[in-house]
Image (cartoon, coloured by chain):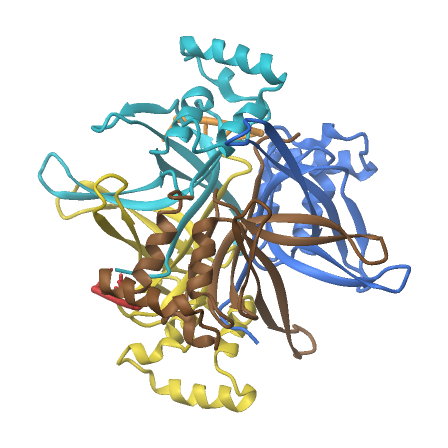
Chain colours: A brown, B cyan, C yellow, D blue, E orange, F red
Amino acid sequence: MSSGTINKVILVGNLGKDPEIRTTQNGKEMASFSIATSESWTDKFSGTRSEKTEWHNIVIFSEGLVKIVKDFARKGSKVYVEGSLRTRKWTDQNGSERYTTEVVLYNFNSALTLLDSRNSMSNSDYKPSEYKQNETEQKDKHGSFDNDIKDELIDDEIPF
Amino acid sequence: MSSGTINKVILVGNLGKDPEIRTTQNGKEMASFSIATSESWTDKFSGTRSEKTEWHNIVIFSEGLVKIVKDFARKGSKVYVEGSLRTRKWTDQNGSERYTTEVVLYNFNSALTLLDSRNSMSNSDYKPSEYKQNETEQKDKHGSFDNDIKDELIDDEIPF
Amino acid sequence: MSSGTINKVILVGNLGKDPEIRTTQNGKEMASFSIATSESWTDKFSGTRSEKTEWHNIVIFSEGLVKIVKDFARKGSKVYVEGSLRTRKWTDQNGSERYTTEVVLYNFNSALTLLDSRNSMSNSDYKPSEYKQNETEQKDKHGSFDNDIKDELIDDEIPF
Amino acid sequence: MSSGTINKVILVGNLGKDPEIRTTQNGKEMASFSIATSESWTDKFSGTRSEKTEWHNIVIFSEGLVKIVKDFARKGSKVYVEGSLRTRKWTDQNGSERYTTEVVLYNFNSALTLLDSRNSMSNSDYKPSEYKQNETEQKDKHGSFDNDIKDELIDDEIPF
DNA sequence: TTTT
DNA sequence: TTTT
């Protein structure tokens, strides 16, 4: 056992596809998607330019953050993600053990913020039916859209 | 109003003095202390060595983290602190406005972890009476001490 | 002196004004600006909504990051900033000591990334003469603009 | 290609074994080791206690940080690690593709700090012959030990 | 005011 | 002083 440890990942990147929403065995919704980060540099000696894209698997168990993802995150959305590293063991079709490392966001000490100046809904063709309804309600209530996104983030604890 | 913003501070440093515990107007306890971080470097040209210590004011409103501070953080303790920057305005004795910047830890998205291999109680003469009792109980339950410190951190919401 | 300490600030926010560029006594350029972060929440009991904006003073000494700020950061730009806390002592007009806390970005372990999907030049009336020329060149070379911004960030060491 | 992205991992944990030092094809030394982080919590409903340890693969290419690892990091050392996520593709003995995710520390925007109050040499039986010599030199120069560790961290790349 |  |  270890004491006094920290396991934190901070990413800013763009969703490669629309997020997937699934329901866990205990009836709670979870969201997952991949985001890309990339770096480019010029080799000191050869002067040649290189660019490398890294893909990160994000898995969200926080009820409040799942809601934000469902409502606003789409393919192409730029997001700030703060979570923890988790390496998961699974068995492939040949019966051999495999490991996959993901960035997981639980209720505690996690965050997800949309960084697109405009919300990212227009980035995807997929718009769930309840979506526009939702949008209308929120504009009715506060005359502001991203504001409510932010609210849901801050009010993380309740009701989840 | 702003959308999609992040305000995060991560510090690892040592307490300069025992923490101060106060009760706010709404009857909740808060903790405050200063921690030091320092950097040393050698000047590129002169080759002279320099060292600079920075002091950070930490203010804790999270009930759970206040409990950890009360029970375990003492002068000299090394801590990991994660919070937000807040600049507070106040009026000095001459009636002129002053500003003080602090690192605040609320319930949401904050963390405090003790990094001393042994807990830091021996670093201070101050040992509240309920303290030893607490220590005994915890050892009884789990045969481990740092473990319980960690527990209290992770189980942030409950019971604190 | 302290060992094993960390002093890190991570902010995502918007510039309140165009950045200021100055030359230090040793002939190097530095940049400074303020960025806003804000949080909004609904009070658990009263249900009233609150919103608080925090302003952060950013001071940049890294030659490479100063160049990015000069070329691309303007009033309204959204930026990711990673630096260190520094509290500076100064004397006001009445001869009394004052303290100001800033987020400083030196060459080491600092970062500044523009998060606007489009570069933020259109956010300001100020456009240095060499600017458009620059833009043309870069589009010629890579057919992409943000890419070069990123390049300059990654290639931090040289020539800045 | 992506612009304005961030890929950052911050870990505090303990080395599971002594680090491995290897030489890359271009003749530079690299270091690798695993560190453990762990979380424990009590289930809200059942009240049962759980504890989970996560292992992270760390790979260091920064010359300055490799030196610190060689000289001071040992099995059991508690370290602060700041790097980037990288998923590496390889082929197993059956010819099937596998992926491994690691935390890599290059020169740029990486950090490694030893958090043990005392340096961690006594944590391992392994003490390379040049080690004690090194220790003597450093004490001769500055009368301080951890100080030099910190120097090397700050003066990462050298010559700065 | 800490720490090495 | 920003942003939505």
In the displayed orientation, state which residue is furthest to the left. B95
**From the image, which quarter does the N terminus of chain B lie in?**
bottom left
Camera-nearest residue between C137 and D81: D81
Q: With C67 as the anchor, is C147 left or right in this view?
A: right
Q: Residue D76 versus residue D50: which sits nearer the camera?
A: D50
Residue C147 percent coordinates (x, y): 52, 77
Q: In this view, does D33 lie to the left or right of C143?
A: right
Measuring 35% from the left and 40% from the top, which residue is drawn there?
B104
The foreground one among D71 and B102 is B102
Numbered marks: total: 0
D158 w.r.t. C137: above or below: above
Judged left or right of residue B55, residue C148 is: right
Horizontal and vertical percent position of residue A11: 52, 58
In the image, residue B107 above or below residue C105: above
The residue located at (42%, 90%) in the rendering is: C133
Kindly identify the residue that appears in the image at 77 percent across and 31 percent down.
Answer: D124
**Foreground residue among A101 and C46:** C46
Tell me where residue B123 appears, x and y as whole percent: 49, 18
In the image, residue B15 sits, relative to residue D158, either above or below, namely above
Q: Can residue B99 be seen in this view?
A: yes
